[in-house]
Image (cartoon, rainbow, N blue to C red):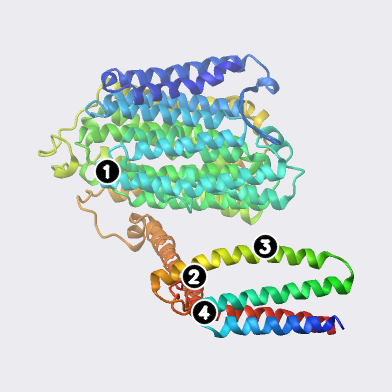
Amino acid sequence: MENLIGLLVAAPLLGAAVLLCGGRRLDRSGPWVGTLLAAVSFGLGVVLFADMLGRSGEDRTLTTTVFSWVPVGGFRADVGFQLDQLSMTFVLLITGVGTLIHLYSVGYMEHDERRRRFFGYLNLFLAAMLLLVVADNYLLLYVGWEGVGLASYLLIGFWQHKPSAATAAKKAFLVNRVGDMGLSVAIMLMFTTFGTFAFGPVLDGAEAAGEGKLTAIGLMLLLAACGKSAQVPLQSWLGDAMEGPTPVSALIHAATMVTAGVYLITRSGAVFDAAPTAQAAVVTVGAVTLLFGAIVGCAKDDIKKALAGSTMSQIGYMILAAGLGPVGYVFAIMHLVTHGFFKAGLFLGAGSVMHGMNDEVDMRRYGGLRKYMPVTFVTFGLGYLAIIGFPGLSGFFSKDKIIEAAFAKGGTEGWILGGAALLGAGITAFYMTRVMIMTFFGEPRWQPTASDSGSAAGSGAPHPHESPKTMTVPMVILAFGSVFAGGLFSINDTFLKWLEPVTGHAHGNPPVSALTVTAATMVVLVLGVALAWARYGRRPVPVTAPRGSGLTRAARRDLFQDDFNHVVLVRGGEHLTRSLVYVDHTLVDGVVNGTAASVGGLSGRMRRLQNGYARSYAVSMFGGAALLIAATLLMRAV
Amino acid sequence: MNPVNYLYLAALLFTIGATGVLIRRNAIVVFMCVELMLNACNLAFVTFSRLHGNLDGQIIAFFTMVVAAAEVVIGLAIIVTIFRSRHSASVDDANLLKL
């Protein structure tokens, strides 16, 4: 069974290699090859899952060392895999949702000339993410981590002929690089502290290591998670990443990439449990991001950017839960899985809408699409109900638990975190209802799309139509997941019992009863929906965006995240380099040039002594000899 | 006779030779003055040999003579060559070797 873990990673990697090296003869079959290999990986995942279920809770972990990677003296880095319940959950999510997205892309990218390459990149993305979750040490995890970064760069910038896409890809890569620095520093710190990178010794030994070191490691891991998971302050790449094709957005937001940060924090739980400061930083980041993303999501008119804001916010929930310690790990992962279902469904739905609307993304030019795209409407609607936490659907179970856990933190902290989570739930209801109403309800506001959309049919008004089967089938399957996953996980606490051996679990005691929390969640939910309906459902939606309040305008500009980055980082960096150049020119060059000039001047004077007259040389020789003799005699005399 | 007198003589000869090297321009004369200095040294060596009662100084004197003979051969050859090319035996005229 252990050998299958390697195959799990190898299948999509093989797909990437074949598709990227195979040349044009694979243009026709390429998409199906990619999808097939993703499905093979999913099949292997299911086999391993069935095998894992056959064993009891404690010895479900499979470990295998494939080969010794870098054995140098005391330094050992092995390529080894570890498949436990946490990894298994991720494997199933990544391969399952990933396969569906592959299938969807077959339809979505049908007319793209470079689709073979696209599927190669998608496979690479899956392989990197799988490597990340099944690695048994931090160094191998880092390889997967970087692979994810690379694949996301390639995919976000897939339509590289658009300057905006190329820029967005670079931005995503650079921002991720900042986070990657954090991870590499954390790994180095681990090596100096524990002498190894393997999960086992590091996490088991965490208790014994000093709190200062653990805090440093924890904060660096948090920085890494912030980069990959688009958390404040490294969140700015996520919105721009929408420049990529929609299936890529679905993949990044649901199955791969942004979930990596949550995985990292959950996996390193032992480190954070022993470092309260780092843990406090994690919850702060989670709470801030969850509100930040939600507020941004409220103001965006671009359907994908609104969903991107929502992802940021939902990942914020997960990070918050993961920062709560053993009380929250299980719920973080549970929300991650349910979110994987409904967010993938929502993105695929958005892609389907764009597909039918000549790639229009402005929701103000949608409206009344429910009659034209019934399947998309229903699946998107179910995803919508799931994400706002409608009772009985997936999001309800997972989000409710996180809010409870946040309150259970206790004290003022608990009230603040719980309040933030509760407020976030209300805002989520508001912006998702807004998206829903603007897209599928109301009067049609279609307009001829701008000529730069690149579509051949870019001239006339769009003719919305339902998407082909390859696109709708994945949406339907994901909709099932959005509806039932949460319930299935929560019956008898199945998910909790499944993950508990790995992450541990502690029951929190919220200051108010769980029922009260649920009731409060319902109240803010209804308020959010009602407010959105009042603003966008009752009144017609203007086609051009009104000026809006100060907050709206700020949120439209992503709460000035880019301006902040520009002023502080770009400008700051420019000033720094300029002053460094100045120092280099004046100080360093001054010293070097000054030395050279003084040596030159001195030797210019010295060369006068070389006048070519043999007799003057003889004089200096005699003089020197006389001096030497005089000195010798003098020394003797003394 | 007191052997120290030989040392005075050697010093006198050496001084005359050194002065000649420094102030005379004619290469031949300079050359002869160099010889004078060498011979002054030889005289000093031999005197010290006598004073100390061993043969070291006398052996060195032979070496000096051999070196002086070799030097005379090469030095005269150079002087003759310079005279042929520059039509002058003045050491100040051969001043091209400079920066």
The three-letter code of the residue at mark 3 reads: Val
The chain containing the residue under callout 4 comes to A
Q: Earlier in the sequence, mark 4 or mark 1?
A: 1
- For disc 1, the marked residue is A438
Query: Nearer the viewer's eye, disc 1 or disc 3?
Result: 3
The answer to which of A162 and A545 lies nearer the viewer is: A162
In x, y percent, where is residue A632?
77, 79
Q: Which mark is residue B66?
A: 3
Which residue is at 60% across, 65% downward?
B71
The three-letter code of the residue at mark 1 reads: Met
The answer to which of A613 and A284 lies nearer the viewer is: A613
- For disc 4, the marked residue is A609
Residue A56 appears in which quarter of the rendering? top right
Residue extending farthest right: B53
Disc 2 is placed on an element classified as: helix
Label 2 crowd (10 A; few <14 / some 14-19 / many >=20):
some
The chain containing the residue under callout 3 comes to B
Whether marks 2 and 1 lie on the same chain: no
Which residue is at 38% across, 34% downward?
A250
Q: Are marks 4 and 1 in contact (CB under 8 Å)?
A: no
In the picture provided, is A149 more to the left or to the right than A371? right
